[in-house]
Image (cartoon, grey):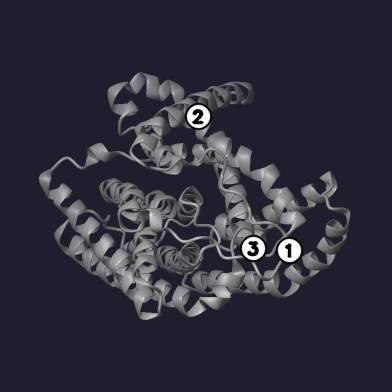
Amino acid sequence: MSNLQLAIQFFFQIAVILTFCQIVGLAAKRLGQPQVVAEMIAGVLLGPSLLGLLAPDLFTKLFPADSMKVLFPVSQLGLAAYMFVVGMEFRMDIVRKKMHSAVAVSLAGMITPFVLGSGLAWFFFHHTELFPKETSLTEAMIFLGASMCVTAFPMLARIIHFKKLAGTTMGTVALGAGAIDDAAAWCLLAVVLASFDGNMSHAIVNIAAGAAYVTVALVLVRPLLAWWARGVERRGALSDREFVFCLVLMSLGAWITDAIGLHAVFGAFIMGAVMPRGVVVHALTERIQPLTVALLLPLFFTFSGLNTQIGLLDSWYLWGMTGLVMFAAVAGKALACYGAARLTGLNNREALGIGTLMNARGLMELIIINIGLQRGIISPALFATLVIMAVLTTLMASPIFERLVGRHRPAAEPEDDSPGAPLSPEPGR
């Protein structure tokens, strides 16, 4: 396809994707599900699992292979921009006060599902063909363990917005633990990819470079931005040039962590977290958030759905393996995180809410298993199994949360380390 044809095709894809996401969203809202879950399901339905199965010719015309060259980078831009906003709304003051809870929940949410996932990988490796022959037992165990311990960090953030939990102990501990879990999962993935390439030094370099990026952002970039923001506060407005400057920082942060083998979402999130609270954050959120959540982020879910083929699970045996994956995912994440939250002094309702929220896999799961599929570490059948696990654990989050926490959800704590009003929830979400 020519560049002009790709552009025309892309605009038509946007119209179809946004319309379908809104239609699915209307149905999801009646079931108490946030729009983000509707977009995740819509992405799978637009892929080969439904549209490609029922109308293969229409699917091929709507999503030709060449069009992925445009859809992929735009979807990544939406993901990075959204995580930049999530970082700006991240409450560092609550994390500091509840650090022991966030770390404990994170460790429980990593170690338990990793052990269960590794055990499943051992079983799958020896008794099934869900791992290709090129994948070693060690690589299989680490990869599936990392897939089990990941939390849907961006999706978790959107659910927290939808439930109006931003700024609460429950929401911030869950976000803090989710950020730690996903960073650890990406480190584990770096180890697997390095092993798969036969060069373990890559993993060490990636992890060290990630730690260096976080350190520089917190120790150097944050104070410089705070000094610059004093002038913005005096004027009471962020200029267009300053807005572009912040977008440049977001892009550089995403580029750095992508280049060092982690993922762009972490670089964008950290850059958002170091942005000065007050006028700067409020102005950036007002400008970035509406277009990002309404237009760009649904494109990522659709792109992921295009790689999902649930029809590959064509036997009761494979569906039984899917059931084992679901059991290990829920037991390892929800129950372990609930127990850790209780042991660190959080009340029963907060612990139940945190365990429920941490169990959602969604977006980050899709990212990791897409990489595993593209690199040949897992088979398409195991990919489909993990997609089902990601969708179901995310679907469970809202109804179980409402059942266990419901109208007793906590109020946001007043922010004590920066000026400015609390940020509003996502519009229409």
Task: Name which quarter of the figure residue 215 lies in.
Answer: bottom right
Q: Which mark is residue 273?
A: 3
Please report contact status of discs 3 and 2: CB closer than 8 Å, yes or no. Answer: no
**Which residue is identified by label 1?**
419
- Residue visible at 40% across and 63% down? 196
Disc 2 residue type? Leu
Badge 2 crowding class, 10 Å Cα cut-off, few under 14, some 14 to 19, many 20 or more, is some
**Which residue is identified by label 2?**
18
Q: Earlier in the sequence, mark 2 or mark 1?
A: 2
Give the quarter of the figure containing the N terminus.
top right
Badge 3 crowding class, 10 Å Cα cut-off, few under 14, some 14 to 19, many 20 or more, is many
**Is 158 or 236 nearer to us in this picture?**
236
Frontmost of labels 1 and 3 is: 1
The answer, for residue 114, to whether it is visible in the render is: no
Dot 2 lies on which element? helix
User: From mark 2 to mark 1, how far is it between C-alphas?
Assistant: 36 Å
User: From mark 3 to mark 2, how far is it between C-alphas?
Assistant: 29 Å
